[in-house]
Image (cartoon, coloured by chain):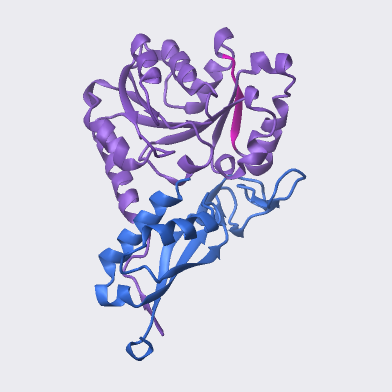
Chain colours: A purple, B blue
Amino acid sequence: MHDINLQDGDVMARLNDLAKKNREKLKAHDVIAINVMGAIGSGKTELIKAVTEKVKGSYNIGAVAGDVAGTDDYEKFREAGITAYNLNTHSDCHLDPHLVDHSLENMPLDSLDVLFVENVGNLVCPADFDLGTELDIVVISVTEGEDMVRKHPKIFAKSEIVVINKVDLADAIGVDPEVPKEDYYNVNPNGQAIFTAVPEGRGIDELIDALDVFET
Amino acid sequence: MHEYSIARELVETLIDQVDEADLRRAEVVHVELGELRVLSKEALSSAYDITTQETVLEYSRIEFEDVELEVSCKECDFVGQVNHEEAEGLHFAIPVLSCPRCGGPVEVKKGNELAIRTLTIADDDED
């Protein structure tokens, strides 16, 4: 037996090249893209809508609705006046840069300032794929329980902004939102955890500040 | 379960860069796996086996080499490995993404690897 070396053994090279092209395309059109990852049902769509509502007077916002199937989130974005593209993965549990490239081809990039790319609800798989976005954030909510960070620690260790949503429901379901916040700071002491509650508008301004892409 | 997507990329990487004659004699694909990758080794091995069924790579298998996280601090001159969180409730030690010396934010130097280091192939007289 003998070993041979590959010229470039990076398994992610093809996908990372696509992510780089997405990044260059977004930059050429002066669009800042934000990859919104998070748990199923954590409120990613409503958060994007809430942020948009606050900034739409000054910024043109677009959204890619990434889901395994269906047009529900896409319809919600459209109803909120957000320029949207529906991206169904059919079976894949994550978005990849190839799918995002298709989305960009179908978005009026010249008329957008910020593009939210809502990933498929999943706290594992999306973490391994660079989409070419400027910023990645993770959303969880108290309704998933106190242990979300402990159960999926790596995506949180890698994320500089974590939103802990639906804190208005914390007392009703007996979950202490400080627990996932503390767990997050244990693995990412320099990150930023933000409590939000969309119906009462709590934390939305703080999230907008943390994203650091909107001048307020 | 993104291991099937990754297995397809792995096979494509091999097909792109290795002669078919060598692929047919491939025995072990040595894969570097960074600590920050959110991949199951068992699932990736299984996905690779299924993806390569009835192909030239059918008789090859993956072996993993772990790459520990290494960072450089953005606030002091520290370069090296980080501390790990081993709190109750965590099933394995999780790297803490901050400088172990000053607590500052860090840049990841190693830990995102997902790369084929070498391919072990059988010599002709071993066929």
Judging depth in this view, the residue of B12 and A81 nearest the camera is B12
Q: Can you give x and y, in whole percent of width and height, for residue B59 in the image?
A: 40, 71
Q: Quadrant of the C terminus of chain B?
A: bottom left
Total count of labels? 0
Magenta stretch: residue A54 in it?
A: no
Q: Is residue B77 above or below residue A153?
A: below
In the displayed structure image, the side of residue B57 where residue A167 appears, left or right: right
- Residue B19 in view here: no
Q: Is residue A33 above or below residue B127?
A: above
In the displayed structure image, the side of residue B76 where residue B8 appears, left or right: left
Q: Which stretch is magenta?
A: A191-197
Q: Can you give x and y, in whole percent of width and height, for residue A177 in the image?
A: 69, 25
Q: Which residue is at 33% across, 44% downward?
A: A19
Q: Is residue A38 above or below residue A128?
A: above
Q: Which residue is at 73% across, 50% downward?
A: B86
Q: Which residue is at 43% across, 11% downward?
A: A53
In the displayed structure image, the side of residue A173 where residue B27 appears, left or right: left
In the displayed structure image, the side of residue A216 where residue A100 appears, left or right: left
Q: Can you give x and y, in whole percent of width and height, for residue A94 in the image?
A: 42, 38
- Residue B88 in view here: yes
Q: Which residue is at 30% across, 59% downward?
A: B12
Magenta stretch: residue A195 in it?
A: yes
As drawn, the residue found furthest toward the bottom would be B125
Judging depth in this view, the residue of B54 and A111 nearest the camera is B54
Judging depth in this view, the residue of B10 and B42 nearest the camera is B42
Q: Can you give x and y, in whole percent of width and height, for residue B72 in the image?
A: 55, 55
As drawn, the residue found furthest toward the front would be B54
Dividing the picture into quadrants, the one containing residue A202 is top right
